[in-house]
Each structure stands twice: as C-alpha cells, then as structure tokens.
C-alpha cells in the first residue's frame, strides 16, 4: 500500500478539532455562557483571542464548546442512523422476499423527502433542541445506510462462504454479525465519515434556524444566527463560528474521500 | 419503454401515498395532546376552544376518514385553511413559493452551467499536484456552509459598495433587473455544492469515456480533439450528470430555506419557520407535502429522461 499524504492530512484535519472540542473543559479560557456586558462586541484582542459576542461572552470558549456540541450531535445522529439503517439493510439482503420489499419500500418513502425538509418536519413534531436535532438527522440518514449496505450485503449473502457457514449450522444472527458485517466495514467507514460531515452542516443549519441547540447553550449555528444580527457592529463571532463549522465539515468530508480511495480501488478516479 | 413507464408510475404512486401518509401522521406523532400544544402559546385556552379546534382539523373523526378527507381535498387543490389567519393554505403557499423556486432554479443554472466547463478543465489537468488541488477545492465547495458564505459576501460587499441593496426580494415583473441583482448572491451561495459535486462528476465521466473504444474510433477517423471531447465524450458524461440533477433539487429546496433567512427573502423558508413558530401544523403539513411531491415528481421526470438519453437502458 502506498503512503497517502492526503489521508494523513485528512486524519490530522479531523483529529485537531475533535481534540479541541473534547478538551473544551480544560482549554476554554472562559465560561461559555458567562456574560461580561461591558466588554461586549470586541474584536480579537489579548485575553479574548477571538473577541466577544453581543453579551460579552468569549467567542473562543463558545466555539470550543460549540464544536463539541456539534460533534456530539453529529456522532449521535450518524451512529443511530448506522445502527437502524445498517440493521434494516442487512435484514433486507439476508431474508429477501417480503422483508426486503417492505423494508426497501419504507426506505424509498423516507428517501423521497428533501433532507432539510424532513429534518425540519421531525424537529417540528418533537420540538426544537439538540437531542431532537440528532434524532431528526438520524431519521434522514437511515435510508442512506440501508440502501448503501443492502447492495454489497446481497452479494456477500449469496457467496459460498455464507452458504458454508449456514451448512455448518451457524445461526442467522451469527452469519450476519460474524460473516457478513465485517465485509461491509470499508463501505460503512467511508459513508460514516462523509455523513458525519454533512450532519455537522445540517445541525448547524437547524441551529441557525433556531430549531437545534437552544440558547444560551453554545452552538456554532446559533452563534452565526446571533452574530448575523450584529454583523455591521462586530462580525467576529459570526465569522469565526462559520469558519469552525467549515473546518469540522471539511476535515470529515476529506477523510471520507481519502478513505474511499484507500479502501475501494474501483472507486478511485482515473488520472 | 411503455412497460417501464408503467412500473415506474406504480412506484411513484406508492411513494407519494407513503409520503402523504407520513405527513398526515405528523400531528399525531406530536408527543402529548397536539391541539393543546397548538393552542399552547395563546392566552385563554378553554376546553371549548380545544374541542372546536379539534373538530376543525377533524381530529374527532376516525383516522381513515380524516386521511381520506385530507388527501382527497388536497388532490382537488384544497390544502385547507391556515390555522390563525384563516386564509386558504394554497394562497399562503402561492405568495411564498416564487422567491424559493426562482432562487433554486437560478442556483441550479449557475451550478450546473459552470460545472460542465469546470469539469472539462479539470479532466484536462494531470499530475499529482493538480489532483490534490482539485480534490481540496471540491471538498471545500461541498462543505462551506452556504449561510456563512452568504454572511461573508454581505459583509464584503457592504464594505466595498455600501449603497448596494442586497437583501430582500423584488418580484420579477415589478423590476426584473433589481430582482436578479438581489438573487445573484444567494444563488451563488446555494450553487457552490452543486458546482463541486457536478464538476467532479463531469470530470470522472469524461476521463472514463475518453478511455473507451468509440473515442479511439473518433480519433482514428481524424476528428479534432475538441470535437472528440465535446461531441463524443461529453455526450456520455451527460448521463450521470442528468441523474444527479434530480438529487440536487432536493438539496436546493432545503438549502434555500436556510439561505433565504440570511438574505431576508420571503420564500417558503419564512413560511415554514413561521408555521413552526406558530405551531400552525396544517400549514406545515401542506408545505411539506407539496414540496416533497414536487421533488418526487422531478426525480421521476429525471429518471425517464435519463432512460431516454441512454439507448442502452431503453428496453
């Protein structure tokens, strides 16, 4: 296997914000919701390295905690979607017949909704908040995993080693978990990384619209929405919060892209 | 071909039925008493008011009857009345839909229009450095938050040209120039992921096509390089391109909701967010049903178009 500087770069691009976000408790110089109304709407300066927002809260601290919140919502939603969609896709591929028809038709229906619209609909029903945003994104991504995994799973379920395992008396659950699932790891890894990236953007969009994380909790999308109102006075909070969203989504997307090259030579673009 | 259209029509009907059922169930999926929640923000909630609203939305009837009333009315074009204003939902949607449609179409034209030449240029670039640069650029295009880009552009232009009016919406028939001038910025923000996606698609489809026999034949019979590239290779690259266009409309409709907020455009986004704020679920249901049906129909059309374009798939 040739060394891939791009993959290493992507890993670094993901690791850096993840470490910063997870270390928010130790790294953040201020309380992310602590207000200092006298020192509000400041630009970058010593002490407040990224400035302060309209309530005098430290932008750097809010970005660190906001990144952590974004990463948590994104990881929870994609994890849920992988669990639900992966299970449905595997069951459809393994049992075929009515199970497959029923599952895939249900997935078709969910897939028919535009992503943001379905997410907004779910939030409208469950009420706004970080947890419901995670559920909403999970609902939207479930059919993606189900469809993606069903195809390769069909091929694997048809293969001789699965027939062999069945002949040897392995249970359905054992066949699926021990023989089929590991062969899908590559596809799952690539898609998980790409969807984590999109989930960051969807979560930020929902929060920007006021449907995700609720104030005063730090959230990157919310910071953009609040910063937009004071844009002409002090654009710093909005600018830095957006840059943080971009950084998180960019690293994860690049990682998925580089992993796809590495794990699936057939998908490697020519040239 | 007829058989194929028929099977696809059955699929289409099934998906639309499923979508309408799911949207219909929205109110019922709300935890707790939906009607009490809908009235929640209003001051004097009496049991009579709750009962009146319940019967107005039809919640006091059997489920199937309710669905039948709702969907048969919707099919006749009657989407119900908006909860608080009392105006027909159809009218509310009609007054908000054009900015969104115009913005989406403009973004699609910009993104898809630039993607073809960009993809051709990208296909002609070779070498590791160019490959890495293109990849970083396309990943950046996919992941720049459109609403942030909008804010940055507003900020930059407000500094460079303070007199420029960038926000809001002017109907096309009122002032076509002002209308387009105000929509260009949001459309550019919205088009970036489409450009990134499609240009990469054009590039890889082109490179794949260029490696095939019929291209060698075209070259062997003495056609110029440009003619080979545009007439022969690009024609083939158009097939995945067209399929992808359908999927992009789904992204556009969602993205438009967010970008509209940045540029203060009174489109469907404003209507939807207003409906959520007012707990106006009948209106929300109608908008989601309508937009999703539109998206499904666009994809149905694209699917047929795609089969027409590719003779190999016609039978």
Image: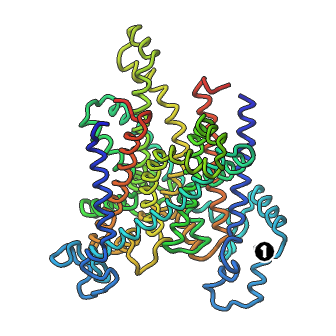
Q: Residues within 10 Å of mark 1 (few under 14, many from 20)?
A: some
Against B125, residue A116 (above or below) is below
Instruction: State which quarter of the image contains the C terminus of chain A.
Output: top left
Determine the residue located farthest toward the top in the rendered image.
B221
Classify residue A96 as left or right of residue A27.
Answer: right
Residue B272: give x, y in percent of width and height: 57, 66
Along the line of sight, the residue nearer the viewer: A237 or B132: B132
Q: Which residue is mark 1?
A: B59
Residue A25: give x, y in percent of width and height: 31, 77
Classify residue B297 as left or right of residue A23.
Answer: right
Against A175, residue A242 (above or below) is below
Residue A155: give x, y in percent of width and height: 59, 37
Instruction: Report how many numbered discs are placed on residues in the image.
Output: 1
Which residue is depicted at the point 41% across and 41% down? A263
Instruction: State which quarter of the image contains the N terminus of chain A.
Output: top left
Q: Chain of mark 1?
A: B
> Does residue B260 appear in the picture of this structure?
no
Question: To which quarter of the image does residue A196 belong?
Answer: bottom left
């Amino acid at each position: 296997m040739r060394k891939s500087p791009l993959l290493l770069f992507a890993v670094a691009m993901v690791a850096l914000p993840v470490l910063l976000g997870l270390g928010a408790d130790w790294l953040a110089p201020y309380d992310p919701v602590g207000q200092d109304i006298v020192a509000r709407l400041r630009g970058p300066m010593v002490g407040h390295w990224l400035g302060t927002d309209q309530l005098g809260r430290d932008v750097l601290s809010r970005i660190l905690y906001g990144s952590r919140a974004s990463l948590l919502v994104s990881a929870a939603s994609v994890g849920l979607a992988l669990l639900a969609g992966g299970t449905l896709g595997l069951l459809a591929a393994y049992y075929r017949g009515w199970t497959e028809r029923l599952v895939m038709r249900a997935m078709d229906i969910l897939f028919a909704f535009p992503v943001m619209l379905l997410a907004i609909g779910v939030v409208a029903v469950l009420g706004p908040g970080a947890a419901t945003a995670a559920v909403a994104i999970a609902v939207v991504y479930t059919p993606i995993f189900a469809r993606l995994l069903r195809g390769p799973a069909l091929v694997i379920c048809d293969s001789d080693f699965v027939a062999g395992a069945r002949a040897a008396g392995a249970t359905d659950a054992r066949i699926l978990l021990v023989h089929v699932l590991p062969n899908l790891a590559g596809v799952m890894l690539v898609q998980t990384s790409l969807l984590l990236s999109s989930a960051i953007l969807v979560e930020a969009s929902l929060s920007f619209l006021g449907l995700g994380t609720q104030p005063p909790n730090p959230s990157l999308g919310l910071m953009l929405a609040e910063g937009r109102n004071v844009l002409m006075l002090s654009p710093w909070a909005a600018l830095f919060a957006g840059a943080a969203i971009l950084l998180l989504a960019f690293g994860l997307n690049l990682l998925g892209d580089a992993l796809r090259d590495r794990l699936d030579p057939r998908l490697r673009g020519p040239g | 071909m007829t058989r194929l259209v028929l099977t696809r029509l059955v699929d289409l009907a099934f998906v639309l039925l499923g979508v309408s059922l799911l949207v219909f169930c929205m109110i019922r999926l709300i935890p707790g008493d939906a009607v009490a929640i809908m009235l929640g923000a209003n001051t004097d909630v009496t049991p009579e008011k709750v009962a009146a609203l319940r019967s107005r939305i039809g919640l006091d009837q059997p489920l199937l009857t309710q669905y039948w009333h709702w969907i048969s009315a919707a099919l006749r074009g009657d989407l119900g009345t908006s909860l608080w204003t009392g105006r027909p939902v159809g009218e509310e949607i009609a007054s908000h839909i054009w900015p969104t449609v115009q913005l989406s179409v403009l973004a699609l034209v910009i993104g898809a229009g630039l993607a073809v030449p960009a993809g051709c240029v990208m296909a002609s670039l070779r070498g590791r450095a160019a490959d890495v640069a293109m990849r970083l650029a396309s990943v950046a295009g996919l992941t720049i938050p459109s609403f942030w880009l909008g804010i940055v552009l507003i900020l930059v232009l407000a500094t460079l040209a303070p007199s420029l009016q960038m926000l809001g919406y002017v109907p096309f028939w009122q002032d076509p120039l002002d209308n387009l001038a105000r929509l260009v910025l949001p459309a550019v923000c919205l088009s970036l992921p489409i450009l990134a996606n499609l240009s990469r698609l054009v590039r890889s489809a082109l490179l794949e096509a260029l490696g095939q026999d019929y291209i060698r034949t075209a070259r062997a019979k003495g056609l110029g390089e440009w003619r080979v590239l545009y007439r022969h290779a690009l024609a083939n690259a158009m097939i995945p391109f067209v399929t992808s266009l359908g999927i992009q409309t789904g992204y556009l409709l969602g993205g438009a909701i967010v970008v509209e907020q940045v540029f203060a455009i009174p489109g469907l986004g404003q209507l939807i967010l207003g409906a959520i704020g007012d707990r106006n679920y009948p209106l929300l249901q109608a908008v989601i049903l309508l937009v999703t049906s539109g998206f499904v129909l666009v994809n149905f059309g694209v699917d047929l178009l795609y089969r027409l374009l590719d003779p190999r798939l016609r039978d």
